[in-house]
């Protein structure tokens, strides 16, 4: 697997750290116990195309949102995760 | 068929042409008391314990490929019972005791070799942690010995003792640990279960569950038709989330790939199973001479049964740190298996919220050594509808209750366990 970082270009996998499924969103501060349990512990564990967060610690140190197929490891899109990186590329 | 020195001698006189198939390749019947999904070590062991310990013989094991084609054929064959937390300690020792009598129980040579497992330590702090773990084992009646540097040098003089960054200082040894022949474990359970009437059905993929009006599972839909069942047990680690999703369940599990490696054959070198404590590297030497080794999971969700280069490099660096001379040994084979990584690194053996559906999942790296214990406690759950006392903490609801069994203490981040 190689990842084409939108800031650094194509880099080898060892430069990146995996965070996991990008779908679970932290519940609001007043969220119910069920919502928090769901967010922390339960996973769709997708077999197929999955949107996920990766960190380019060995390069630009940006958080990336990557769509990758868990059955084949094929990466179909790489974009900056919400935040500073996304704002920079939006300019 | 019964195996013995006499059956071996008889077959030898006829040129070994009289051996029969050791288990029966069955076709599905309409209905079984218990259907086990997954013809790996755990599923077959469960069926055998159901038939032999609990008297339930109208049992089918469904396997989508051929038996042993999943993680039972993709591990590094290590057996040990040196876990430190309540829940794990007793369960893995139960499993270890079953390994010690497996060949007699099954009448099958599973090549259980208690050659010892040694975890090397490389700092004072790590020695203290290992001493504590060893004491935990000993007060639970499990063997453990803390070796100093001189004892390790005597046992394994070939290690690099001049590593300035990660000097070997000693090790924690479990002499009863070792290895077993992974395929023979699958065939042995198939042999013994089949002899008691269990149907082992291959090329039979489960595609859904049959449910009655109350939602109770009444059978499984498969590629070979509908099969009715009083109870259905899942033993499909690696694919647990996918099968559970057919019953509308979401699990506290992510599927990750773990790689393993075999080198070309070399002369006898490594007398035991050993682990490098400053990284993640474990190795033994097979009877054919190959070094069988592995390390960390790759760290990203995967169902692909293959891994990537960075982890391969990391694992080999761990090996080189201990034994620089293996740098000239060529890698022969490398493969990946799909691990059910649970949210605390420990397994789940429990009823599910769906009536009639039982779960055996979340084995992380630990599935092979657990095979006989897992079979016994899962059979107990299926037969009695209550957990076996050594599996009483492996509940599905423990994450909600905050009763995690987290050996590494890293929290709900499956790729760090």
Image (cartoon, grey):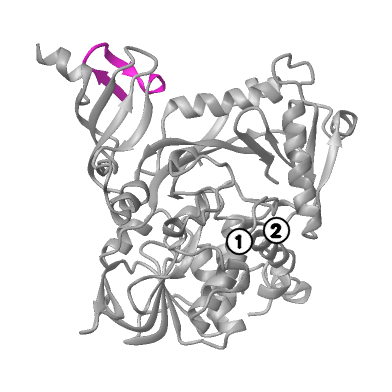
Q: Which residue is mark 1?
A: B184
Q: Is residue B69 visible?
A: no
The residue located at (73%, 69%) in the rendering is B101
Q: Say which of B273 and B133 sits in front.
A: B133
Kindly indicate the quadrant of the structure image that contains residue A22. top left
Q: Which residue is mark 2?
A: B111
Marks 1 and 2: CB-CB under 8 Å? yes
Label number found at residue B284: none
Kindly indicate the quadrant of the structure image that contains residue B167. top right
Q: Secondary structure at mark 1?
A: helix
Q: Is residue B52 above or below residue B255?
A: below
Q: Is residue B126 visible?
A: yes
Q: Secondary structure at mark 2?
A: loop
- Which residue is farthest left? A91
Counting other residues with Cα less than 10 Å from the Cα at mark 1, is it few (<14), some (14-19), or many (20 or more)? many
Question: Is residue A6 in the magenta section?
Answer: yes
Question: Is residue A42 in the magenta section?
Answer: no
Spot occupied by residue A15 in the image (x, y as percentages of width and height): 39, 19
From the viewer's perspective, tell me whether residue A37 is left or right of residue B67. left
Counting other residues with Cα less than 10 Å from the Cα at mark 2, is it few (<14), some (14-19), or many (20 or more)? some
Q: Is residue B278 above or below residue B261?
A: above
Q: Quadrant of the N terminus of chain B?
A: bottom right
Spot occupied by residue B189 in the image (x, y as percentages of width and height): 58, 70
The residue located at (31%, 52%) in the rendering is A38
Q: Is residue B95 above or below residue A1?
A: below
Q: Which residues are magenta?
A: A2-15
Q: Say which of B41 and A19 sits in front.
A: A19
From the viewer's perspective, tell me whether residue B353 is left or right of residue B18. left
Letter of the chain that mark 2 sits on in the rendering: B
- Asked whether the residues under marks 1 and 2 belong to the same chain, the reply is yes
């Amino acid at each position: 697997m190689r990842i084409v970082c939108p800031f650094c270009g194509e880099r080898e996998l060892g430069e990146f750290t995996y965070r996991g499924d990008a779908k679970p969103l932290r519940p609001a501060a007043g969220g119910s116990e069920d919502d928090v349990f769901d967010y922390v512990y339960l996973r769709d564990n997708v077999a197929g195309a999955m949107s996920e967060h990766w960190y380019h610690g060995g390069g630009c140190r940006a958080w990336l949102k990557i769509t990758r197929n868990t059955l084949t490891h094929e990466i179909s899109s790489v974009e900056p995760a919400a935040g500073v990186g996304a704002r920079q590329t939006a300019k | 068929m019964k195996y013995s020195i006499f059956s071996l001698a008889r077959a030898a006189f006829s040129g070994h042409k009289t051996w029969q198939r050791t288990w029966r390749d069955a076709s599905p019947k309409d209905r079984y008391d218990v259907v086990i999904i997954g013809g790996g070590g755990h599923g077959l062991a469960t069926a055998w314990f159901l038939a032999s310990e609990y008297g339930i013989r109208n049992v089918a094991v469904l396997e989508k490929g051929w038996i042993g084609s999943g993680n039972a054929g993709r591990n590094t064959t290590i057996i040990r019972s040196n876990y430190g937390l309540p829940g794990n300690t007793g369960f893995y020792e139960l499993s270890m005791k079953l390994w010690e009598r497996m060949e007699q129980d099954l009448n099958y040579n599973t090549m259980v070799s208690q050659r010892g497992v040694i975890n090397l330590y490389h700092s004072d702090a790590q020695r203290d942690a290992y001493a504590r773990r060893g004491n935990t084992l000993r007060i639970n009646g499990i063997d453990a010995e803390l070796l100093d540097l001189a004892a390790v040098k005597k046992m394994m003089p070939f290690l690099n003792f001049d590593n300035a960054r990660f000097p070997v200082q000693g090790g924690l040894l479990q002499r009863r640990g070792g290895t077993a022949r992974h395929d023979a474990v699958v065939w042995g359970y198939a042999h013994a279960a089949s002899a008691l009437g269990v149907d082992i059905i291959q090329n039979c993929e489960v595609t859904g569950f049959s449910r009655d009006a109350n939602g109770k599972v009444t059978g499984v839909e498969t590629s070979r038709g509908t099969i009715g069942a009083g109870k259905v047990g899942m033993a499909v680690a690696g694919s647990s989330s996918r099968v559970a999703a057919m019953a509308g369940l979401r699990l506290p599990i992510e599927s990750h790939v773990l790689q393993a490696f075999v080198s070309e054959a070399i002369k006898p070198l490594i007398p035991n199973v050993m682990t490098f404590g400053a990284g993640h590297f474990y190795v033994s030497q097979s009877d054919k001479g190959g070094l069988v080794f592995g390390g960390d999971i790759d760290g990203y969700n995967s169902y692909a049964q293959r891994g990537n280069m960075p982890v391969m490099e990391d694992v080999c660096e761990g090996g080189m740190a201990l034994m620089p001379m293996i740098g000239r040994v060529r890698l022969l084979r490398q493969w990946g298996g799909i691990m059910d990584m649970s949210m605390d690194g420990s397994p789940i053996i429990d009823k599910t919220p769906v009536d009639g559906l039982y779960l055996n999942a979340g084995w992380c790296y630990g599935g092979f050594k657990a095979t006989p214990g897992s079979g016994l406690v899962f059979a107990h759950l299926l037969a009695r509808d209550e957990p076996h006392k050594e599996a009483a903490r492996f509940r599905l609801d423990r994450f909600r209750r905050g009763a995690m069994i987290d050996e590494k203490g890293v929290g709900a981040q499956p790729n760090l366990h």
